[in-house]
Amino acid sequence: MVGRRVVSSVALRRRTPIAALAAAAALLLTACSGGLPTSSGSGDAGTTGQEQPKAAPPTIKIAPAEGTTRVRPDRSVVVAATNGELESVTVRARGKVVKGAFDAARSRWRSKEPLRPGTTYTVEAKATGEGGPAEATSRFTTLKPQSTLAIADVTPAIKGETLGVGAPIIVTFNQAVKDKAAVERALHVKAEKPVPGAWRWVSDNQVIYRTAKFWPAHQKVTFTARLTGVRSGPGTWGTQDSTTVLKIGAAWISTVNVKTHMMIVRKDGKVVQRMPISAGKATTREYTTTSGIHLTMERGSPVVMTSPGRKEGDPGYYREVVDHAVRISSSGEYVHSAPWSVGSQGRANVSHGCINAHPRQAKWFYDNFHRGDVVKITGTNRPLEWNNGWGFWQLSFKEWKKGSALNSAR
């Protein structure tokens, strides 16, 4: 027919796939150029459908636990954290904070000093981790001792006193010490000019410190007894620390030669006095001056000296009142004034064992005396016993150290 275009069904069938492919291509181009379609729903973008679990906060454990009583003072306070790090730990009682330290990972804190007996402590700890912060507290009480260990005396340690370079530190306790090693560990000596030293127990309640060599002159030495929380025996604990400062003066060292009848006094190595003397006449052991390293112990003017073990009327009895006497042993030996034997001084030994000197020189020695000054005596066959007065230097340092409780405790 004229004016009408007829399309056959075959032609239509051939065009349909081409159109569909074109439409699909257009849709693909649109998707690539515009990105991924977003959800129009109310959920979060990118949700996978499964939420991650939330981290747990740190857990803090304190020992001793809350409410614990009769805690041993030598027990450590331990704070531990899991799932986090410890941020801070404070242990205190009566306004005093207990020293302690964290481990490398800051997951544990441990106290570094004993606790005070019969005392209530509080512990405050904080930790932090992925799950947030955490806090914990504890309140506990240490046991009350049945008896208390304390220092009864430190010699020589008069306030303001200047001591000689041979001075020991003699510590006497108020009662017998059973655990000597534990107590000895609590005793500390710190010198401005350090020198090795060691303690030696001479009885159950007395211990003595001596250096390997004489103290270096002109310095301060601090003795500290950290007895708080130290168990010295069943039911017995230290409850208080103490500190004593000792002043070491010049090196006063005197040498006495009994055979030449001469005493030479040196101060810091310089000769400051030459004293003719008369020593023990040595007719008996009792009247023989002891040889060895003596220390000056005390002085008096006058001092009444009597023959030991004798009463008036007995053979060999004497009673002398002497001036300016400086004791150098417990067996009765002194350096003292002897005006009655001036003619023998420098020439002969006529005393009962003391070192007799001219009144003028004896007074000089008396006036310059310090406890712990060194007097070395030679020339007799009677050695000074190490425990005769302050004859501690009669023992070698190796032998001296054998008296330490720590040697047997190792």
Image (cartoon, rainbow, N blue to C red):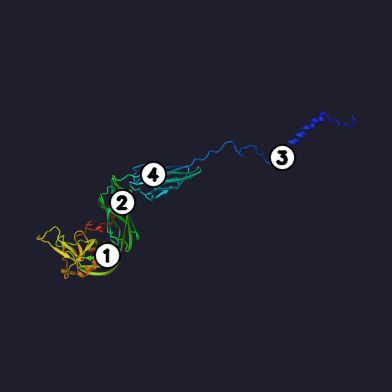
Q: Mark 1 or 3 closer to N-term?
A: 3
- Residue in the foreground of this view, choosing between 186 and 125: 125
Q: Is residue 6 left or right of residue 332?
A: right
Residue 57, horizontal then vertical, whole percent: 48, 41
Question: Which of label 2 and label 1 is nearer to you?
Answer: 2
Q: Note whether residue 27 is visible.
A: yes
Say what secondary structure mark 4 lies in: strand
Residue that badge 3 annotates: 30
Q: Residues within 10 Å of mark 3 (few under 14, many from 20)?
A: few
Front position among marks 3 and 2: 3
Identify residue for label 2.
Answer: 184
Give the residue drawn at x 25%, y 69%: 273
Disc 3/disc 2 C-alpha distance (Å):
90 Å
Residue type pointed to by label 2: Glu
Residue 253 is labelled as 1
Answer yes or no: do the residues labelled 2 and 4 have beta carbons within 8 Å?
no
Image-quadrant location for residue 264 = bottom left
The amino acid type, in three-letter code, at marker 1 is: Ile
Q: Amino acid at mark 4?
A: Arg
Mark before the other along the chain sequence, 1 or 4: 4
Residue type, numbered disc 3: Thr
Q: Which of pointers 3 and 4 indicates the residue nearer the eye? A: 4
